[in-house]
Amino acid sequence: MTFTSVTAWPVTASAATFRVDDSGTRISSPLVPMRWRTLVPGRGSDNAAEGQVQVALRLNVLPWLNQRGRIYMTLAPAPSGDTIRASWRTQGRLLPGSIQSGGRTVIYEGAMPASTLEETIELSITADGRGLTSPQALQFSFDIETP
């Protein structure tokens, strides 16, 4: 992945982390149908299943209005224990990226110019299809670190 700019973020003992209210976020479909990546999955083959969903993120950053911060997306470990990967494209307000279950990644860095940070993302989910025997709830959340 290539970024057009990189900003150094000093690690200090006074940095604080807070949960960001994402209750305004809407998902185009609560159930994401997963499809095999290859026509004939199986032994010696790719067992990945993929699905896509559009997400209208709406993050309430009012408590940090006009402050600098770094917002992270987290993905809780999968209920099945399997590794699930998610990647996304953005329209430019947030950083595109990827994450795997149990991980955390930066999606925004800079000043909070408004009370909400809004972006529509195309989220792609990939998992080992052999472990998808029943629906699984994925738990995404957002945190902010401020200097």
Image (spheres, rainbow, N blue to C red):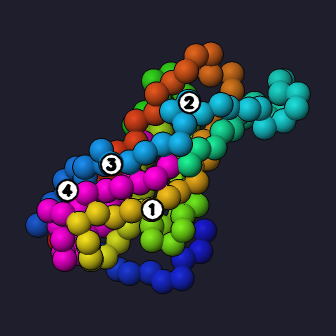
Query: Which circle, 1 or 4, is nearer the viewer?
Result: 1
Q: Residues within 10 Å of mark 3 (few under 14, many from 20)?
A: few
Q: In terms of depth relative to the viewer, which is nearer, 103 or 87?
A: 87
Indicate left or right for 30 with 21 as reference.
right
| Inter-mark Cα distance, 2 to 3 | 18 Å
Q: Quadrant of residue 63?
A: bottom left
| Inter-mark Cα distance, 2 to 1 | 21 Å
Comes first in the chain, label 2 or label 1: 2
Taking the spot 23% from the left edge, 66% from the top edge, the residue there is 115
Pointers 3 and 1 in contact (CB under 8 A)?
no
Q: Which residue is mark 3?
A: 24
Taking the spot 74% from the left edge, 32% from the top edge, the residue there is 35
In the image, residue 13 lies at what x, y percent?
13, 66
| Inter-mark Cα distance, 3 to 1 | 12 Å
In the picture, which quadrant includes the N terminus? bottom right
Q: Which residue is mark 4?
A: 17
Taking the spot 11% from the left edge, 67% from the top edge, the residue there is 14
Comes first in the chain, label 3 or label 4: 4
Pointers 2 and 1 in contact (CB under 8 A)?
no
Taking the spot 58% from the left edge, 16% from the top edge, the residue there is 134
Whether residue 74 can be seen here: no
Pointers 3 and 4 in contact (CB under 8 A)?
no
Where disc 2 sits, the SS reads loop
Q: Which residue is mark 1?
A: 119
Q: Quadrant of residue 84?
A: top right
Query: Which circle, 4 or 2, is nearer the viewer?
Result: 2
Q: Which residue is mark 2?
A: 31
Comes first in the chain, label 1 or label 4: 4
Q: Quadrant of residue 67?
A: bottom left
Q: Amino acid at mark 2?
A: Leu
